[in-house]
Image: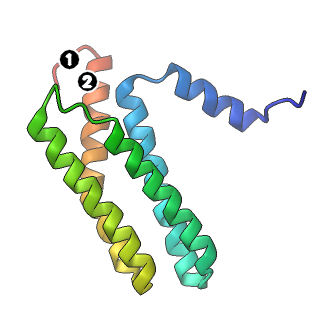
Amino acid sequence: MSAMNPHAQYLKTRVLTASPGELVVMLYDALFQRIRHAKLCFEDQTWPKAGEVLRNAQDILTELMASLRPEHAPDLAKNLFELYSFSKRKLVEAYGTKNVALLDEVIRVLQPLRDAWAEADRSLREGRPS
């Protein structure tokens, strides 16, 4: 049996010990990392790799969509679902048109959500209202 590399072990431990808010922030961070990677692929014109990275970014958006709980906040869940759907369409359009500005638009639209999740989670862990 092969040993898990230290980085993979760290990530596994981090995910297993993360709060729900931290997990959402981690998904956003992974999404932005993929989009930044795709931007580099666009610059290098390595289109197959860009496509692979953007498909992975879409998978992360799908996971964010699946994590929504409309029974707790129907309007919020609906709005987030639409925003994630919009972002997925922009990633597809960016790849199809080779338009890097559309990748920036996805980050611009979603960054405030990531920051809000991070602040809310930080407030909960510190025991203060967000």
Q: Left or right of 129: which side holds 12?
A: right
Which image quarter holds the C terminus? top left
Amino acid residing under circle 2 = Ser
Q: Left or right of 44: which side holds 92?
A: left
Q: Residue 43 occupies which quadrant of the picture? A: bottom right
User: Reading the chain from its start, which is encountered first: label 1 or label 2?
Assistant: 2
Which image quarter holds the N terminus? top right
Is 111 rendered above or below residue 7?
below
- Residue under the point 18% across and 33% down: 70
Q: Residue 109 occupies which quadrant of the picture? A: bottom left
Q: Where is residue 18 in the image (x, y as percent from the top left)?
A: 47, 24
Most foreground residue, 96 or 34: 96
- Residue under the point 43% across and 57% down: 58
Amino acid residing under circle 1 = Arg
Residue 128's tag is 1
Q: Mark 1 Cα within 10 Å, few/some/many (few <14, many 20+)? A: few
Residue 123's tag is 2
Q: How far apart are marks 1 and 2 (CA)?
A: 5 Å
Q: Position of residue 119 (x, y in %)?
A: 27, 34
Q: Mark 2 Cα within 10 Å, few/some/many (few <14, many 20+)? A: few
So how many labels did they put on this image? 2
Q: Check if mark 1's residue and mark 2's residue have beta carbons within 8 Å.
A: yes
Q: At numbered mark 2, what does the secondary structure look like: helix, strand or loop?
A: helix
- Residue under the point 39% across and 69% down: 91
Q: Where is residue 129 in the image (x, y as percent from the top left)?
A: 16, 20
Instruction: Spot the residue most to the left.
Output: 75
